[in-house]
Image (tube, helix red, strand yellow):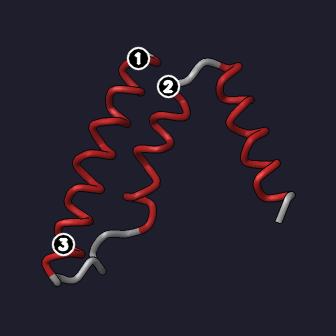
Amino acid sequence: MKRFMLVLGCLGIMVIYGGFFYLLLSGRSVAPIRWYYLLSPWLCIFFGLSKLQQQQVLHWFLRKFKSK
């Protein structure tokens, strides 16, 4: 199941971000794309990681935001 989440997240990034950048570069409105559509593939990837990798990602984010 975790491998499926990783594959789904990677495919989601390619499709969603590909469409987003296509609309952005072609001059069309990107207003219909909500922020959670851009975030959802990353959540699939996060939950596809092992527990240790998830903890490492969370610690990395905490260090990133605390240093600013």
Asked if marks 2 and 1 touch (Cβ < 8 Å), the reply is: yes
45 relative to 52, above or below: below
Q: Residue at x 27, y 77 (%)?
A: 30
To which residue does mark 3 refer? Answer: 23
To which residue does mark 2 refer? Answer: 48
Hey, what amino acid is under mark 3? Leu
Mark 1, Cα crowd under 10 Å, few <14 / some 14-19 / many 20+, is few
Mark 2, Cα crowd under 10 Å, few <14 / some 14-19 / many 20+, is many
Q: Nearer the observer, disc 2 or disc 3?
A: 3
Q: Earlier in the sequence, mark 2 or mark 3?
A: 3
Q: Residue furthest right?
A: 66
Q: Position of residue 12 (x, y in %)?
A: 30, 43
The kind of secondary structure element at disc 2 is helix
Real-space Cα separation, disc 2 to disc 3, in angstroms: 29 Å
Hey, what amino acid is under mark 1? Arg
Q: Earlier in the sequence, mark 2 or mark 1?
A: 1
68 relative to 58, above or below: below
Q: Residue at x 85, y 59 (%)?
A: 67
Q: Residue at x 40, y 58 (%)?
A: 38
Front residue (pair 64, 12): 64
Left or right position of 54 against 40: right
Q: Nearer the observer, disc 1 or disc 3?
A: 3
Q: Residue furthest left?
A: 26
Q: Position of residue 26 (x, y in %)?
A: 13, 77
Hey, what amino acid is under mark 2? Gly
Left or right position of 57 against 29: right
Q: What is the number of the mark on residue 3?
A: 1
Q: Residue at x 42, y 15 (%)?
A: 1
